[in-house]
Image (cartoon, rainbow, N blue to C red):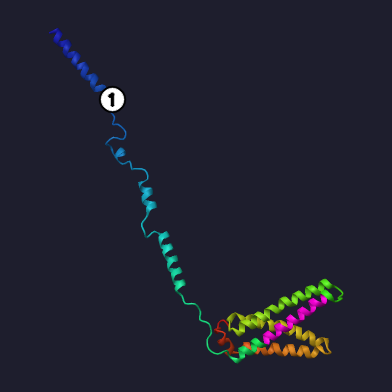
Amino acid sequence: MSSKKSTSAKQAAARSADQGKPGKTSKPGGSGSAGGATRRPGTTAGAKKGGSPGRPGGRADGAAGKAAKSAAAAPAPAEPSGPRPARIAAAAALTALEGAVLLGFGVYLLVMGLIGDPDSPRQAEMLAVTVLALALLPVAAARGLWLRRSWSRGPAMITQLMALPVAWTLVQNGGGLIAIGVAVAAVSFAVLGLLVNPTATQALGIGPRDA
């Protein structure tokens, strides 16, 4: 009997010892929610970077391509056709005459500065170069008017506005320069009147807004 009691006591003590041990903890990353919810690196980034064909960058490229195609398909502005109006021909001739006079005067000043006996040869040469450079403006304007280019109207009118002060200075000096000043002023006013005429602007392809 005593042996049975001791055996049962040992079994009760063993059971109490087993019940007092701490429970087992679950391994991290197992079948729990924390481990199962782990995502593969790069999946979301790849989805974001990959994008769909309709992303903003693709739309911008498509719009730029359409704009380039429309610009290439746009027809070039047609040049004026038909006979050259007499007003344009007269304005071109008078402007060319002004350019020729300036060229001749510039060459004369250059020759006199090189082989003549001016007070300051360097100043005479610089004046000659300046006059020759100014002569290019009416020459280019006259050619443009003859070819009926719309851009030629501006340089031609600028030439006349620059010639009017010169004409006034010549008249103020008196003597034989008065006739030259009057002639220069008459030519300038004539060209201005020809170029502001609606017939001339239409022949040059200049619309109401451009005029």
Residue extending farthest to the top is 2
Q: In the figure, residue 198 lies in which quadrant?
A: bottom right
Q: Residue furthest front?
A: 115
Front residue of 80 and 172: 80
- Please state the horizontal and vertical placement of residue 163, each as a whole percent of the image: 72, 83
Q: Position of residue 88 (x, y in %)?
A: 61, 88
Q: Is residue 122 above or below residue 197?
A: above
**SS of the residue under disc 1:** loop
Residue 13 falls in which quadrant of the image?
top left
Query: Which residue occupies 61% across, 84% down?
Result: 145
Q: Is residue 105 left or right of residue 76?
A: right
Start-end of magenta stretch: 94-113
Rendered residue at 15%/11% (across/down): 5
Q: Residue 14 location in percent, x, y?
A: 21, 17
Count every numbered label the image shows and give the total: 1
Which residue has dot 1 on it? Answer: 22
Q: Nearer the viewer, residue 119 or 55?
A: 119
Tell whether position 208 is magenta.
no
Label 1 environment density (alpha carbons within 10 Å; few <14, some 14–19, many ≥20):
few
Residue that appears at 79% across and 84% down? 169
Residue at the spot 70% in from the left edge and 89% down from the top edge:
187
Residue type at numbered disc 1: Pro
Characterize the magenta stretch by its predominant secondary structure.
Answer: helix
What is the quadrant of the C terminus in the image? bottom right
Quadrant (top left/top right/bottom left/bottom right) for the N terminus:
top left
- Residue 48 is situated, as x and y percent measured from the top left of the image, at 38, 52
For residue 133, side relative to residue 52 (left or right): right
Between residues 187 and 51, which one lies in front from this camera angle?
Answer: 187
